[in-house]
Amino acid sequence: MKRLGRILCTLSLLGLVLSGCWDRHELNDLAITVGIGFDKSGDEYLVTAQIVNPNEVASKKGAGYSTPITTLSARGISTLEAARKLTTSAPRKLFASHLRIVVIGEELAREGVAKVLDGITRDHEVRSDFYIIVARGTTASKVLKILTPIERIPANKMFKTLETSEKAWAPTVSVRIDQFITKLSEPTTESVLTGIRIEGDPKKGSSKSSLAETEPITNLQYTGLALFKQDKLIDWLNEDESKGYNYIVGNVKSTMGHLACPKGGTITVEIIRSKSKMKGAVKNGKPEINLHVILEENVSEVQCEIDLLDPETIHELEQTAVKSLKKVMYASINKAKENKADIFGFGEVIEDASPKLWKELEPDWQNEFAKLQVNISADLHIRRLGTTNNSIIMRREEE
């Protein structure tokens, strides 16, 4: 009897432990939110949620009566109040565990983003694997309303495009919420976020009829990097300056560029490997940064008369490429110096090189950064010429 009693007690305890998830959510009761936008609306915040329409996405053919996503907006004194107000128009509870993208309107970004990001970082249901971007010249609400071809869910399109672009095109960079918050907490290092703009008519882009065209009427395109000082957007880096930033911090995985030929025309090269080394030094009592970049390139396209089989020609092209590389890197550094914003982390490198000097520089680092000496050197090698040697233009002349 005692043994039977122990077994019954054990089974009862197991029943309590294995009774299921107390905080479970039924899928039919959730509104899967894949994109969230924050804008300024007077003294309030405007929160926009991009919600997946399951009937349009789950079925192979789709129900056909609505768009793949629905956007809902609400205003509030705080972002969380506005988000809760969305429940007055949403038939289901908003569920943000599958969040892919957070868009911040440019106006709000210029006023400061720390307050709007506080709530989303505290939410235990929200994972940190989504990206943050800035709506350039427009609002986050308008960006989230644009329908996209190929990828039916626009938030997924923005997420995947940013990842693909970062790997194949140097001017973009993907930043997660935890990375951005970490930069905000550092007193001497500033941040950048990739900007996105609307190409075309925003009103037409939010209509399902826009997807019936082979060439999209409206499209979302990443463009430039938003330069932040503390939590405020203060300037934009153009395409070359954005490339320079990524070369300096070692973000370039692969990209394309062109070089001028000695006799006119251009050569397109593909960067296949890139590595950046950053070291701090003290010279005559003043700090300086030494940047060394290692690049490997392949010739991808030739649109000029040039003998690529001549080693001297290859050497000249490498020297031209080094000059072009230094130009975009210095352009990025100069833009950051103009805004007194150390987006590269030079201060941390100086601290490693001379902790004693850094204690003197840290209180006024933004002004010290503006006059910091930066030296750039590069080892650049052209490795391959492709499946052909000289160009078709050269072959015609030889004939």
Image: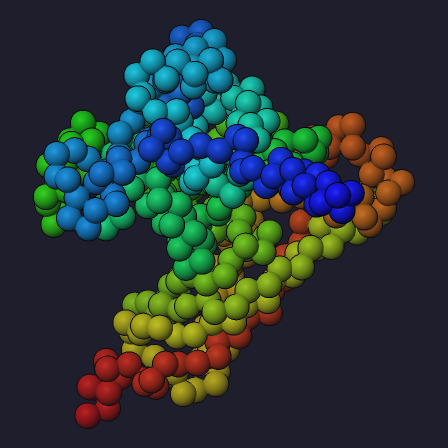
Image quadrant where residue 295 sits: bottom right
Give the residue at x 47% y 24%: 109
Residue 8's spot in the image, x, y percent? 68, 41
Tell me the quadrant of the picture where the N terminus can be found. top right
Residue 380's spot in the image, x, y percent? 55, 70
> Viewed as shown, does residue 189 lie left or right of 152?
right
Q: 377 or 278, which lies in front?
A: 278
The structure's colour scheme is: rainbow
Residue 312's spot in the image, x, y percent? 48, 82
Q: 133 or 206, which lies in front?
A: 206
> Viewed as shown, does residue 176 lie left or right of 256?
right
Identify whether 155 is placed above or below 255: above
Residue 78's spot in the image, x, y percent? 49, 13
Give the residue at x 65% y 38%: 12
Image quadrant where residue 52 sits: top left
Give the residue at x 46% y 63%: 254
Tell me the quadrant of the picture where the C terminus can be found. bottom left
Residue at the extreme top of the image, as rendered = 43
